[in-house]
Image (cartoon, rainbow, N blue to C red):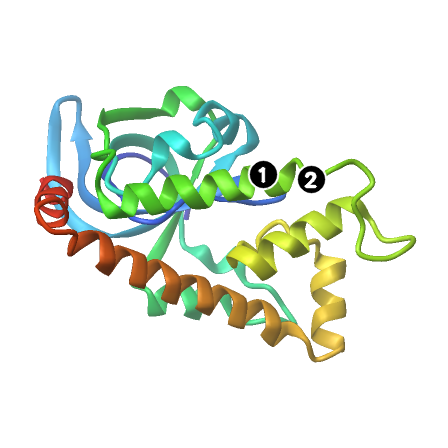
C-alpha cells in the first residue's frame, strides 16, 4: 500500500541518473508522526527522484553521501521494481537491507538539514563520480561506437562500462546484452568501480595528519 510520510536520514549512496530522473539510498533515522514530533526508527530506503528533483539537486551534487535530509515521500514495497527476464530487483534490494521504496516528485519535498563534509572521503568520491558522469553526458556530438548506433545508447553504455552506472541503459540494449551473454560485462564494470572506490576511500582515510581528521568530521 502507498503511504505518504516525512522521513529523516542521511544519504548513503552516490545518486545515480536513470532514464526518468535519478535514485539514491537513505539511512533512515526517524519518521515524523506529527508536526515537530519524530519517532526514531532505523532502516534503509531507496528513493526514486523525478527528473525535476534530479535537476534541482544539481544532478545529484547536493545529495552526496553524508548529507542529512528531511524528505516527504510516497512509500511503497518495491515489488514493482521487479524486472522480468533480468535479475530479481526485490531480492537484490532486500539483500542490501532495503525493504521500502520512496518516490520524490517535487524539489520542495526535500529539505537539506546538514551538508556532508566536503573533505569526507565519500563526498570526494561522489563528486568525482558525478563529475565524470556529467562529462560522459556531454560527449562530442555524433559520438557513436559504430554506424547506425544511437548516440544516447552509446553514452549510457559508456557510463555502465566505465563507472558501473547502468540505470540509463535502455530496455532494448539490456535485452541485447542478455541475449548475447554479455550482461556480465556491465556487472563486472560495476564491481571494479566498487573496488576502486574502496581503495580510494581507504587511501584518503590514511593520509597522514589529514585522513583521520577528515574521517572523524565525516562521521559527525
Is 71 on the left or on the right of 88, as rendered?
left
Q: Tell me, yes or no, whether the two marked residues, 1 and 2, touch with CB atoms within 8 Å.
A: yes
The residue shown at (59%, 76%) is: 184
User: Could you tell me how many numbered marks the image carries?
Assistant: 2
- Nearest the camera: 54 or 46? 54
Q: Residue at x 17, y 22 (%)?
A: 35
> Would residue 47 be seen by someone viewing this image from the given angle?
no
Looking at the image, which residue is at 33% across and 38% down? 64
Mark 2 Cα within 10 Å, few/some/many (few <14, many 20+)? some
Vertical arrangement, residue 113 with respect to residue 79, above or below: above
The residue located at (35%, 35%) in the rendering is 63
Q: Image check: 15 left or right of 164? A: left
Q: In this view of the protein, can residue 26 be seen by the observer?
A: yes
Residue reaching furthest to the front: 208
Which residue position holds label 1?
A: 135
- Front residue of this view, candidates 151 and 86: 151
Residue 158: give x, y in percent of width and height: 65, 54
Residue 136 relative to residue 152: left or right = left
Residue 154, above or below 87: above
Quadrant, the C terminus: top left
Quadrant of the rendered image containing residue 133: top right
Determine the secondary structure under disc 2: loop
Residue 191, horizontal then vertical, whole percent = 45, 69
Identify the disc placed on residue 201. Answer: none
Q: Secondary structure at mark 1?
A: helix
| Furthest-right residue in this view | 148
Which residue is farthest top?
108
Between the residue at mark 1 and the residue at mark 2, the CA separation in whole angstroms equals 7 Å
- The residue that mark 2 highlights is 139
- 40 left or right of 66 in image: left
Crowd rating for badge 1 (residues with CA inside 10 Å; few <14, some 14–19, many 20+): few
Q: Work out whether 210 lies above or below 95.
A: above
Amino acid at each position: 500500500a502507498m503511504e505518504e510520510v516525512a522521513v529523516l536520514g542521511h544519504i548513503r549512496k552516490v545518486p545515480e541518473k536513470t532514464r526518468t530522473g535519478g535514485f539514491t539510498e537513505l539511512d533512515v533515522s526517524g519518521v515524523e508522526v506529527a508536526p515537530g514530533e519524530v519517532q526514531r526508527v532505523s532502516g534503509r530506503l531507496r528513493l526514486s527522484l523525478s527528473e525535476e528533483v534530479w535537476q534541482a539537486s544539481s544532478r545529484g551534487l547536493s545529495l552526496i553521501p553524508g548529507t542529512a535530509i528531511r524528505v516527504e515521500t510516497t512509500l511503497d514495497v518495491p515489488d514493482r521494481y521487479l524486472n522480468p527476464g533480468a535479475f530479481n530487483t526485490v531480492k537484490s534490494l532486500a539483500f542490501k537491507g532495503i525493504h521500502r521504496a520512496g518516490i520524490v516528485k517535487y524539489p520542495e519535498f526535500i529539505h537539506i538539514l546538514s551538508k556532508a563534509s566536503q573533505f569526507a572521503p565519500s563526498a570526494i568520491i561522489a563528486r568525482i563520480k558525478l563529475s565524470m558522469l556529467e562529462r560522459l553526458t556531454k560527449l562530442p556530438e555524433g559520438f557513436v561506437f559504430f554506424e547506425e548506433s544511437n548516440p544516447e545508447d552509446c553514452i549510457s553504455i559508456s557510463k555502465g562500462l566505465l563507472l558501473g552506472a547502468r540505470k540509463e541503459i535502455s530496455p532494448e540494449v539490456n535485452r541485447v546484452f542478455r541475449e548475447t551473454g554479455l550482461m556480465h560485462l556491465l556487472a563486472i564494470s560495476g564491481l571494479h568501480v566498487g573496488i576502486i572506490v574502496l581503495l580510494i576511500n581507504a587511501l584518503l582515510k590514511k593520509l597522514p595528519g589529514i585522513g583521520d581528521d577528515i574521517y572523524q568530521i565525516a562521521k559527525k
